[in-house]
C-alpha cells in the first residue's frame, strides 16, 4: 500500500543545529587568523575575547530561558554563532566586559524578548555590535598598538588628502589593523567557500552586496569629481567588514528575504547604505548599520516580492471583472 502523509514532506536532513554548526566552522579561519595576527601585540587577548563572547551568549540565552521557564535551546548553536560574530567585530584592544555587554543586548533585547531563534527581527550579533559602538565609540574604534595609533585601511583611505595607493596583497592576506575577524579577506573567503559548497548560503546576496557597494562608491566619487581608481575600489571591497558582513551576516536566514527578487533588492539596499556611510558618513565603516537597517526593511521587501500561488492572479482578474460588470 502506498501511504501519503500530510504535508510538509521533509526531504532534507538539515536542521538548525547542523546549519549553525557549519556557520561556526566557517567563522573559524578568519577568527583563528585574527588571534594569530594580533598575538605579537596583544597576546592571548583576542582569544580571550572570543571565548568570553561565546560563553556570554550561551549563558544569557540559557539564563533567560531558565527564568522564563522556556525549553533550553542553546544546543542549536545559534548562541555560539552570535558570540563568534560579536567577537569578529571587536577590536583587539577591547576589554573583557565589552563582549559581555554586547552579548547581553544581542541575545536578550534583540533575540529572546522577541521569541528566540526564528522570531528576531534583526541580526542579534549586529544589534550587540551596534550597541557597543554607540555606547563605547572610542573603545570600539581604538586599534592602537603600544599606545601608537594604528589606523585601519578604511580610515587611511577616508582621511587621506590625496587618494593613497593601497597594498592589495597585504589587504587580501590580512597584514594590517582592524577588528579581530575582519583583517584577512583570504580567510573570510575560505569560510565563505565552505558555506557555499555546503549550500548553507546562496551567493546572490553576498555578490550583489559587494558589487553594488563598490559600484555606488565609484558613482558617488565620480559625481563629486573625486579621484577614483581600480586600486581604491578593490581596497574598499577587501577592507573593513564588507566581506564578513556580506557572507556571514547579511545571509542570516531569519533576517534576510526568502524570495530571489527580494534577495537582490535587499542586497542593493545594503550596497547603497554601505556606500553612503563610507563616503558621506563621519566614520569609515558602515556595514553593521547598513545590515541592521536592511533587516528592518525585510518584511516590506518580502511583501512586495512574494510569488502568488498558481491561479491567484486569474482569480483577482475574475473578481475585478465581476465588480466592473456590477
Image (tube, rainbow, N blue to C red):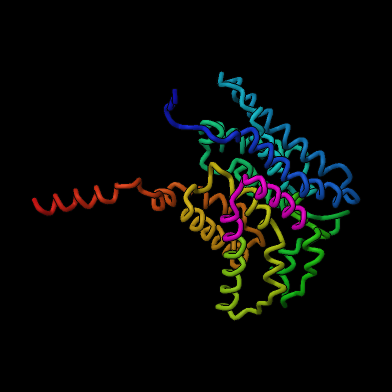
Segment tinted magenta in the rendering: 185-209
- Estimate the x, y position of residue 23 in percent, counting from the top left: 68, 42
- The residue under the point 62% across, 57% down is 286
Point out the residue furthest to the left here.
326
- Nearest the eye: 8 or 238: 8
- The residue under the point 66% across, 77% down is 228
Left or right: 105, with 45 as reference point? left
Q: Note whether residue 142 is visible.
A: no
Above or below for 4 versus 121: above
Left or right: 159, with 272 as reference point? right
Number of numbered callouts drawn: 0
Point out the residue furthest to the right here.
40
Left or right: 1, with 285 as reference point? left
Give the quarter of the image for residue 18: top right
Q: Note whether residue 77 is visible.
A: yes
- Estimate the x, y position of residue 72 in percent, counting from the top left: 61, 23
- Estimate the x, y position of residue 59 in percent, counting from the top left: 68, 28
- The residue under the point 64% across, 35% down is 78
- Estimate the x, y position of residue 26 in percent, counting from the top left: 72, 45
Give the quarter of the image for residue 165: bottom right
Above or below for 21 versus 4: below
- Dominant secondary-structure state across the stretch colored magenta: helix
Location of the N terminus (image quadrant) = top left
Point out the residue furthest to the front here.
1
Give the quarter of the image for residue 222: bottom right
Q: Is residue 189 magenta?
A: yes
Point out the residue furthest to the top here.
69
- The residue under the point 66% across, 57% down is 242
Q: Is residue 138 magenta?
A: no
Amino acid at each position: 500500500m502506498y501511504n501519503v502523509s500530510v504535508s510538509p514532506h521533509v526531504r532534507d536532513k538539515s536542521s538548525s543545529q547542523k546549519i549553525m554548526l557549519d556557520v561556526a566552522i566557517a567563522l573559524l579561519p578568519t577568527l583563528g587568523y585574527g588571534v594569530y595576527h594580533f598575538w605579537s601585540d596583544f597576546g592571548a587577548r583576542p582569544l580571550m575575547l572570543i571565548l568570553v563572547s561565546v560563553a556570554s551568549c550561551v549563558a544569557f540565552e540559557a539564563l533567560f530561558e531558565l527564568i522564563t521557564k522556556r525549553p533550553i535551546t542553546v544546543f542549536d548553536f545559534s548562541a555560539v554563532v552570535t558570540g563568534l560574530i560579536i567577537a569578529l567585530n571587536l577590536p583587539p584592544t577591547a576589554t573583557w566586559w565589552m563582549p559581555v555587554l554586547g552579548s547581553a543586548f544581542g541575545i536578550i533585547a534583540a533575540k529572546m524578548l522577541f521569541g528566540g531563534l526564528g522570531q528576531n527581527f534583526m541580526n542579534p550579533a549586529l544589534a550587540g555590535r551596534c550597541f557597543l559602538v554607540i555606547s563605547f565609540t572610542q573603545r570600539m574604534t581604538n586599534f592602537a598598538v603600544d599606545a601608537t595609533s594604528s589606523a585601519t585601511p578604511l580610515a587611511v583611505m577616508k582621511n587621506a588628502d590625496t587618494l593613497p595607493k593601497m597594498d592589495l596583497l597585504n589587504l587580501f592576506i590580512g597584514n594590517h589593523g582592524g577588528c579581530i575577524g575582519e583583517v584577512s579577506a583570504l580567510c573570510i573567503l575560505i569560510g565563505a567557500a565552505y558555506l557555499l559548497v555546503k549550500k548553507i548560503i546562496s551567493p546572490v546576496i553576498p555578490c550583489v552586496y559587494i558589487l553594488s557597494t563598490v559600484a555606488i562608491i565609484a558613482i558617488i566619487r565620480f559625481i563629486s569629481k573625486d579621484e577614483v581608481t581600480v586600486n581604491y575600489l578593490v581596497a574598499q571591497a577587501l577592507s573593513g567588514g564588507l566581506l564578513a558582513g556580506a557572507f556571514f551576516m547579511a545571509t542570516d536566514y531569519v533576517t534576510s528575504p526568502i524570495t530571489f527578487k527580494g534577495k537582490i533588492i535587499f542586497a542593493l539596499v545594503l550596497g547603497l547604505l554601505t556606500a553612503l556611510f563610507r563616503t558621506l558618513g563621519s566614520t569609515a565603516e558602515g556595514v553593521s548599520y547598513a545590515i541592521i537597517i536592511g533587516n528592518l526593511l525585510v518584511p516590506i521587501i518580502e511583501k512586495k516580492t512574494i510569488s502568488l500561488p498558481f491561479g491567484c492572479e486569474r482569480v483577482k482578474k475574475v473578481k475585478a471583472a465581476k465588480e466592473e460588470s456590477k
